[in-house]
Image: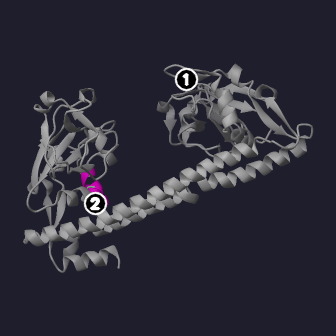
Amino acid sequence: MSGASFLEKLLDGAVVEWRPLSSLGELVRGNGLQKKDFTETGVPAIHYGQIYTFYGLSTKITKSFVSPVLAKQLKKVNKGDVIITNTSENLEDVGKAVVYLGERQAITGGHATIFRPGNCILGKYFAYFTQTETFAGEKRKYAKGTKVVDVSATDMGKINIPIPCSENPKKSLEIQAEIVRILDTFTELTAELTAELTAELTARKKQYNHYRDQLLRFEDGNVEWKPLNEIGEFIRGKRFTKADFVEDGISAIHYGEIYTRYGAWTDHTVSQVRSDLEGSLRYAQPGDVVITGVGETVEDVGKAVAWVGDGDVAIHDDSYAFRHSMNPKYISYAMQTAVFIDEKAKHVSRGKVNRLLVDGVAKVRIPIPHPDDIEKSLVEQARIVSILDKFNALTNSITEGLPREIELRQKQYEHYRNLLLSFPKPEEVAT
């Protein structure tokens, strides 16, 4: 049975009334509360930013606390209340909701609105509705701001919420409760499956890392370990900023993207910079390996991505292009091994920002198979790359393997949730 036909059966001919949120309960705008106010113990507290980073749809416990003295000055949250975010850097996070189910009274602060449900709506039913495409479209109408997006408590109160069988509150709550029960079950099953797939993915990655390191250890065979400065040269990029990014311009790799957006290799860039910068930039050529020069962690410094696309690509001045005559993917994979990372770490200048001392890392060695026969060496490098590419796709690719399966399960859940909460609006019924 589809979600749509199940909903028709559940409603059993009952009329659905769309009512403004403000008419369904009390809306109270939060006040105060900064992260510096948090204490180890005290009164339970929910900061608006935690709603889209820490909490799920409901919670019995809070991540943070504040002192009882400060709590007296802040808005109170009772069991069953729904806390809604009003502000974020992106519209998707605005309007996110968490139902508070704790026994102790809690507090919340500014940039959040407390919704206290009346006797015609369940808090969790409303919270589920805030996750739908319908609600997303409604809040978009009232969104203000660009860098920081805001939907005020007043405007949030104007958003219409579907109330099934509104003329019979008892039956309405029963229908809402059944929808919540189904979605709770679906949420739990999806979470369990995602956890299992994630655990499997973690195990696969660990297995892949072990196999890659073993494959590139060359315990047997004709191999010579050579320092990078004997294999190629390092070419530092030239500065550009994220403000220089455009939709259509010069293909570019920003150093921060190497440890957030790219894998071991890429044949296309995720960013482009202004064309008028062409003469002031420095470029990686096809076959170069682009290496980060800075990072927040030692692990991020010296991360590598092989550029195997067509044409040159601009690189940032906090990164280097390593130019050589070997298989670029092979070098990038070699730079991911535990042996290389341990050696690389010795040449990182540690501080608030960790920097790669390129003169030092140039001395780190990687294995060269068949060093006296270039053709045979390249064949062996290509063979190893082929094996690791297949392993890499299974563990890291977003288009296949376990990551794709996790994504599909989440989309399946969102699809059925939207179906269950897709009530006809008056104009749809009329047509």
Q: Is residue 122 above or below residue 374?
A: below
Q: Which residue is mark 2?
A: 134
In percent of width and height, residue 260 lies at 53, 40
Q: Which residue is nearer to you in this view: 31 or 350?
A: 350
Q: Which image quadrant: the C terminus? A: bottom left
173 is within the stretch colored magenta: no
Q: Which image quadrant: the N terminus? A: bottom left
Mark 1 vs mark 2: which is more N-terminal? 2
Q: Which residue is nearer to you in this view: 242 or 56?
A: 56
In the picture, the disc for residue 354 is: 1
- Give left or right: position of 195 versus 133: right
| Picture quadrant where residue 234 is located | top right
Q: Which residue is nearer to you in this view: 342 or 327?
A: 342
Q: Is residue 26 above or below residue 347?
A: below
Residue 396 can be seen in this image: no
| Mark 2 burial class by Cα count in 10 Å: few <14, some 14-19, many 20+ | some
In the picture, the disc for residue 32 is: none
- Secondary structure type for disc 1: strand
Predominant SS of the magenta segment: helix
- Give left or right: position of 380 versus 419: right
**Which contiguous range is marked in magenta?**
131-140
Marks 1 and 2 close (CB-CB < 8 Å): no
Instruction: Report the residue at 75% width, 46% height from top.
Output: 215
**Residue type at the position of mark 2:** Thr
Number of labelled discs? 2
In percent of width and height, residue 412 lies at 41, 65
Of tags 1 and 2, the one toward the viewer is: 1
| Picture quadrant where residue 306 is located | top right
**Residue type at the position of mark 1:** Asn
